[in-house]
Image: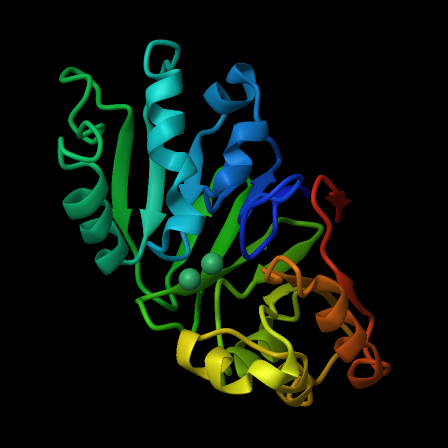
Amino acid sequence: MNIEILGCSGGIGKNLKTTTFLINESLLLDAGTGVELLTLEQMTAIRQVLITHAHLDHIVGLPLMLATIYDAHRQPIDLYALPEVIDALQQHIFNWTLWPDYTVLPEEQPIVRLHKISVGDRLALDEINVTVLPSEHPTPTCGYLLADNHSSFAFSGDTGCNDALWPILNRLQPQLLIIDVSFTNELDELAKLSGHLTPAQLAEQLSRLEYDCEILITHLKPGFEEAIMQQCQPLLVSHNARRLLHNERISL
Ligand SMILES: [Zn+2]
Ligand SMILES: [Zn+2]
């Protein structure tokens, strides 16, 4: 499996894009501002989109991408998300006020088909099997575990302390986990309120992991990246952990 990291920041700014991962060139995992790094050809090659939740930093690229490829697309894109996320997209984005309703355009074959999924569901998308994972965030959110015959990885989605996640990871044993650490330890209360992790909370959560798994840290708040990673270092010495980087390509 090939994972292209188009965006992995908790905010925007020069050289920073929000959560957007491209898998095997045809599956988009979240559609943040990283979508703007794709060429027109790359956008038209996308067949499926998995959305973790409706927060803008994870979906803002989607309506813009659909408008961009509207004339070029040849077959509908299948989008998967929790029911509350689908409802939010329909009510607040594709409502003819913020953006045209691309779920009904063009009339003969809409450009996007919305599919409601639930935590625990398993989806077969071409050669990739997807398991929908639980997340802890102030708005309905999920993570995803993607697996093919040779490799697998999990993405936590935006999440705070998430006790339901670890037994599932221990059972399915993805070789890589991409997980949210947005704030430094000093902002513990803000992290809890906003449903993100600090380095100390991540270390506590990782004590539940019962096998060797590479850990990549994502969604760091702009300006706090170095402080977060400095705090992570001593806490994570027993783990194979590092920061996820913009523009990196991961081959599993
Ligand atoms: Zn969020
Ligand atoms: Zn986010």
Give the residue displayed 58% in from the left and 43% down from the top: 17
Q: Is 243 on the left-hand or right-hand side of 105? A: right
Q: Is 244 on the left-hand or right-hand side of 60? A: right
Give the residue displayed 51% in from the left and 83% down from the top: 161
Q: Is 151 on the left-hand or right-hand side of 85? A: right
Quarter of the image for residue 13 reads top right
Residue farthest to the top, as pictured: 71
Percent across and percent down for residue 248 are 75, 42
Q: Is residue 100 above or below residue 95?
A: above
Give the residue displayed 42% in from the left and 40% down from the top: 49
Percent across and percent down for residue 204 are 65, 90
Q: Is 58 on the left-hand or right-hand side of 220? A: left
Q: Nearer the viewer, residue 141 or 78?
A: 141
Give the residue displayed 67% in from the left and 86% down from the top: 200
Quarter of the image for residue 31 reads top left
Q: Nearer the viewer, residue 81 or 35?
A: 35
Residue 7 visible in this rendered orientation of the protein? yes
Percent across and percent down for residue 213 are 75, 71
Q: Is residue 10 above or below residue 186?
A: above
Residue 175 visible in this rendered orientation of the protein? no
Percent across and percent down for residue 77 are 36, 30
In the rendered image, which quarter contains the N terminus? top right
